[in-house]
Amino acid sequence: MEQKNSEAKWEAKVSTRLQKASADQIFSLFKDFFGLNKWFPNLSTSYGIHGENGEVGCVRYCTGFSLPPESGWSKERLVAINPVERILSYEMVDCNIGFNSYFSTVRIVPHQLDGQNGCVIEWFITVDPVEGMTLQDLVNKYDVGLQGMAKNMEDALTTS
C-alpha cells in the first residue's frame, strides 16, 4: 500500500551569486513570467495561457524539463510578486512530471563584492515527495538549472 501522503513535504533551497548583474536587473528578467524558457536550460517552451504576463493569477505552460518524462509539461500560476523586495512566488497547478504539489519562491537579494553591485538568487521549493527521486536528486537538478539560468541571464545583461 502506498503512503505518499504520509511523508512530510520536501523543502529545499538553492542559490547562486552573480557578480556582473544587479538585483534589479535580474528581477526584471524574472518578472517576464511567461518567458522562462529564454533563461532556463533545457526548457524548450514557456508561454502564457491565462492572464497578463507578470500579474498575480497569470498561468504559464512549460515543456522540456530535465525530469522524466522527456515530453514533460507543467502549468504554473504566479501567486505573488513583490518588485520592491524582488520576490516572486508560483505554484504548479497541473503537470505530468511527477509533482503532486509544488510551490516555489524566488528571491533576488542585492550583494556587493569588491565594489561591484551583484546579487544572489535564492530559489525555495516545497513539494510533495516525488516518486523515483530523492530530495537530494531534486536539489541537484534545481541547482544545475539555477546555475545555468543565472549564467544565461548574466551573459545577456553584460553583452547588451
Image (tube, rainbow, N blue to C red):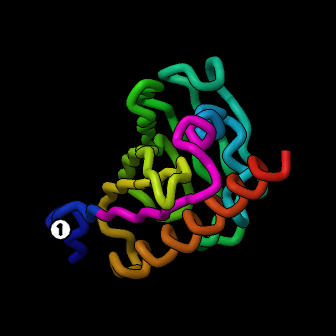
Q: Residue at x 68, y 35 (%)?
A: 34
Q: Position of residue 21 (x, y in %)?
A: 62, 49
Q: Left of 73 or right of it: where is 140?
A: left
Element on which disc 1 rests: loop
Magenta part of the protein: which range? 12-27
Above or below residue 32? Residue 143 is below
Magenta residue check for 68? no
Which quadrant of the view contains residue 25? top right
**Residue 75 showing in the rendered view:** no
Q: Position of residue 71 (x, y in %)?
A: 71, 64
Q: Position of residue 89 (x, y in %)?
A: 41, 38
Magenta residue check for 22? yes
Q: How many marks?
A: 1
Query: Which residue position holds label 1?
Result: 7
**Residue reaching furthest to the front:** 115
Q: Left of 68 or right of it: where is 158?
A: right
